[in-house]
Image: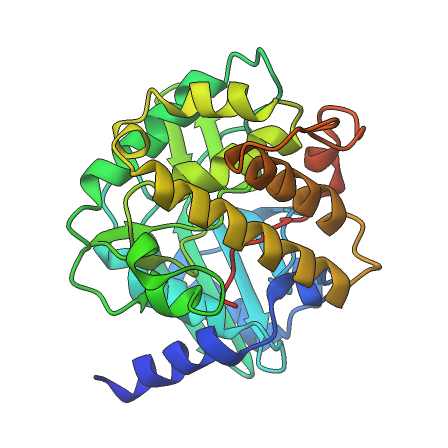
């Protein structure tokens, strides 16, 4: 095993979780060191215009760059960013992803900054609320991911059995699919050609239904009742072929994990509703009565929060 991967795997297991850090204020492009901006322009040509991207919680800088040859999406982190290793992980994994994942075109590691330049995708984030016309496209994307990423591409990633070892029995999540694990709607872009899933910074190798199961929690968070969310998931073959006992155990483990993460960071208001949704699903899977299945946060409030409310990062 390569030394770099050993370090990444250890970090995945031991590092603080992204949601345990407050969202980082974005540095405007013009405030990057001049030497760093010059290093980027040696790869892109002159940058004509810059549009800041405000969603996300990890990158110190994220922007759409316009050049004579078109648009690029750039994100990156300073050397002292405690979660900056995620950018290196994403750069390492990107060549192994199938289309339509945006291709990493360049990376600049200069004067204490790591910046990644990806193909730009012009799209919008999906609406996950009940009745949304975006839901079929999200299901199609999850189906395609489970199919095209099985077997897992030949890249070293953490096993799901290790990621959730303290919460879920290994045989439940074991598998040979590259699983995204961070299915926040901010990582889905809907456009005329379909759906593109971005930010493959922390995938793992596991059961093919994991991403769909995590999306079930997102749907409950967006206002679906558990039975509605599971009925939606039934159209995805990886989900419908899962053992019910495996889904029961996964729901129970994720519910406990999400509540622990909320307790670690009580000031992060987005974690509570997501933990409520995970507990609601686990309660439903256990056959218990559910008087209230989601918080009374208005539909769309998750999108307005502007940060990823992930409950699935390594624990």
Would residue 226 appear left or right of 119 to someone viewing this image? Answer: right
- The image shows residue 20 at horizontal and vertical percentages of 69, 66
**Quadrant of the drawing holding the N terminus:** bottom left
Q: Of all residues shown, which one is farthest toward the front?
A: 288
Would residue 167 appear left or right of 220 to someone viewing this image? Answer: left
Residue 304 sits above or below residue 56 on the image: above
- The image shows residue 284 at horizontal and vertical percentages of 57, 32
Q: Of all residues shown, which one is farthest toward the bottom?
A: 3
Q: Of all residues shown, which one is farthest toward the right?
A: 267
Would residue 188 appear left or right of 221 to someone viewing this image? Answer: left
Say which residue appears at 74% left-offset and 67% top-offset. Answer: 264
Say which residue appears at 28% left-offset and 44% top-offset. Answer: 208
Question: Which is more toward the observer, 62 or 178?
Answer: 178
Say which residue appears at 34% left-offset and 60% top-offset. Answer: 204
**Count of labels in the image:** 0
Q: How is the image coloured?
A: rainbow
């Amino acid at each position: 095993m390569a030394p770099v991967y050993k370090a990444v795997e250890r970090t995945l297991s031991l590092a603080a979780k992204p949601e345990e850090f407050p969202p980082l204020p974005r540095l405007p492009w013009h405030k990057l060191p001049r030497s760093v901006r010059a290093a980027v322009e040696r790869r892109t040509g002159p940058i004509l215009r810059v549009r800041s991207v405000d969603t996300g919680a990890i990158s110190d800088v994220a922007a759409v760059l316009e050049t004579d040859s078109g648009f690029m999406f750039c994100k990156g982190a300073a050397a002292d960013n405690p979660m900056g290793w995620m950018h290196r992980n994403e750069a390492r994994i990107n060549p192994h992803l199938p289309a339509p994942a945006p291709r990493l075109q360049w990376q600049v590691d200069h004067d204490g900054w790591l910046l990644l330049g990806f193909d730009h995708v012009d799209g919008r984030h999906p609406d996950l609320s009940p009745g949304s016309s975006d839901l079929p496209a999200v299901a199609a994307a999850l189906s395609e991911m489970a199919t095209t990423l099985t077997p897992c591409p030949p890249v070293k990633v953490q096993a799901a059995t290790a990621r959730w070892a303290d919460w879920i029995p290994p045989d439940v999540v074991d598998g040979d699919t590259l699983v995204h694990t961070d299915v926040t709607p901010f990582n889905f872009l809907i456009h005329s050609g379909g759906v593109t899933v971005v930010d493959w910074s922390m995938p793992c190798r596991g059961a093919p239904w994991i991403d769909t199961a995590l999306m079930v929690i997102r749907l409950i968070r967006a206002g679906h009742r558990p039975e509605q969310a599971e009925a939606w998931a039934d159209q995805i073959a990886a989900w419908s072929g899962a053992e019910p006992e495996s889904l029961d155990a996964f729901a129970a483990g994720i519910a406990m994990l999400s509540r622990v993460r909320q307790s670690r960071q009580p000031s992060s208001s987005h974690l509570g509703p997501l933990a409520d949704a995970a507990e609601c699903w686990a309660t439903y899977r256990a056959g218990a009565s559910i008087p209230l299945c989601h918080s009374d946060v208005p539909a769309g409030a998750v999108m307005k929060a502007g940060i990823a409310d992930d409950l699935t990062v390594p624990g």
